[in-house]
Image: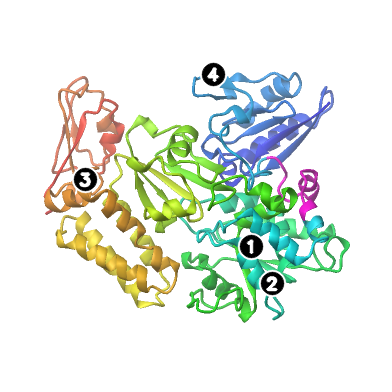
Amino acid sequence: MSKTVLVCCGTGCLANGSAKVAEAFRALLAGTGHQVECLVKETGCQGFCENGPMVRILPDDITYYKVKPADAAEIVAQTVEQGQPVTRLLAKNDAGQPVTRREDNPFFAPQVKVALRNVGIISPASVEDYVNRGGYSALKKALTMTPDEIITQVELSGLRGRGGAGFPTGRKWRTAAGYDNFPKYVVCNGDEGDPGAFMDGSILEGDPHSVLEGMAICALAIGAETGFLYIRDEYALAVAHIKEAIANAEAAGILGDHILGSDKKLKLSVVRGGGAFVCGESTALMASVAGRVGEPRAKYIRSVQRGLWDQPTVLNNVETFANIPVILDRSGAEFAKLGTDGSKGTKVFSMVGKVKRTGLVEVPMGATLRHLIFDIGGGIQGDRPFKAVQTGGPSGGCIPEELLDLPVDFDTLKSHGAMMGSGGMIVMDDRSCMVEVARYYVKFLSEESCGKCTPCREGLRHILAILTDICQGRGQLSDLDLLEELCRTLADSSLCALGKSAPNPVLTTLKYFRQEYEAHILEHRCPAGVCTALTSFAIDKDKCVGCGACSRACPAGAISGGVKEPHVIDPARCIACGSCREACKFGAVETKGKVAG
């Protein structure tokens, strides 16, 4: 009987030393005398990044977490040779019981893997691994179909673009196919510039062939023979894996001048991103691919008619293309059984922030925010109160606790001032200041604005200045009306989606957390204790046990007190960083207001 040791070698696990874990297994299994033949395989990100490196043993289906190279010998002796689990390396369910199967881990159990179906199971660039999982069978099927038949299946699936806009994929393909202007191009958006987002990067790292297959099917549907993958410059591992996958697919005769031995051809190339957030916008991205400055253009002429080099171009993001082979394999109607009426299939989210279990999550469209954050994510760190979740990246909206039961789909989120975006999800607890959250994202967007249009360039600067004043105690009540007016102008008159969606974090925090803005302005107090100009800290002597944790954590040396005696904060030396509050386990550190000086 043969076994396989899958070692997660996604970016997160590599940072935690998973390459050395894989080396340790190989060294142990290279010698003779083993009862079981065993293959060691480096895979892409399995999603549970904070608990990496992860190791999974097949066919026993035993998954280990936070594995160190020193653990390899015990795993080989106990699990590979005898099929018995090493209990200390297992995950625990919500009842505190150890579980062996990955699917019994409460983080993975509710998930439905479609776009991530192969990630963590196959060796990323291996054509053989991908084919053994059914890879390229959809492309083979597409070669027997007409372009109309391919597009009809995509239309029946109800697939909408996963890059953020949610435009119907089938409609985009059909429009591009209708033009007789050649050459045509197929482009994959792998820029993924949202802070905290790593969905597309993980697919490119862990299952690059699914993206290549999706692009090849698109090329057959619209009549393209050339394609480009525009990948974020920081995604070095993704770039390396996709380049290797392209070379291997061409060597196997899958891509190139004769796709799977047919008279169809497709040449794919990788273009490194220019490091600009605005290049995630379709027209700016295509300008960057063509070697020009990455600036958007007005969309009175669509890219499907005149895109890259003014030729018909279909641009979809990584996750969208990864879904295409599944649609052709299972049929569009079968794919459409997942999700909601207006949002079909699944969606991959990167869930980060103040949630207990962070990582990559894939669920059917329509799953609630509560299900994602509390059932899969395990709730809030330290069991603190939930405050908000921001969906959709820096241009996304902040959703409060009373809306936790909202279904996550394109239209529902939009109707509440948020958006799906590419799938970033940042969870916040009661120690998050919503005014500062809005200011942070507006600062990011202001710096990333290309400056081509005045509403975005100047509007974001003015909004940022107002939010900064509020956070520093210089705000006025009239600022709130002015913020709303500026946001409406920005949304109505900006050239591209960066400016049009930039008001979302401001408008949603004003709508759902207006009392925090008013506290900053009227009371000179930051309720969350984040804005240093409006925050001071004091220690409740009745709660303080004199453990000294606050004193040891204070970088300014502002806390004094003896062992088992109440401690005191010197306001003249305190820099209001909040380190004492984080260190105290007894809730003795209180947040106070402070008049800005």
**Mark linked to residue 97:** 4
Q: Secondary structure at mark 4?
A: loop
Q: Secondary structure at mark 1?
A: helix
> Sequence-wise, which precedes: disc 4 or disc 1?
4
Q: Give the amino acid type for the residue marked by disc 4 in the picture.
A: Gln
Image spot of residue 14 (x, y percent): 60, 43
Mark 3–mark 1 distance (CA, rounded to whole Å): 56 Å
Q: Residue furthest right?
A: 261
**Mark linked to residue 439:** none
> Sequence-wise, which precedes: disc 3 or disc 4?
4
Please state the extent of the stretch shown in magenta in the rendering.
121-138
Q: Which residue is mark 3?
A: 575
**Mark linked to residue 170:** 1
The quadrant the N terminus occupies is top right
Q: Which residue is mark 2?
A: 177
Q: Give the amino acid type for the residue marked by disc 2 in the picture.
A: Ala
Report which quarter residue 36 is drawn in. top right
> Sequence-wise, which precedes: disc 3 or disc 1?
1
In reply to whether residue 176 is colored magenta, the answer given is: no
Q: Is residue 465 visible?
A: no
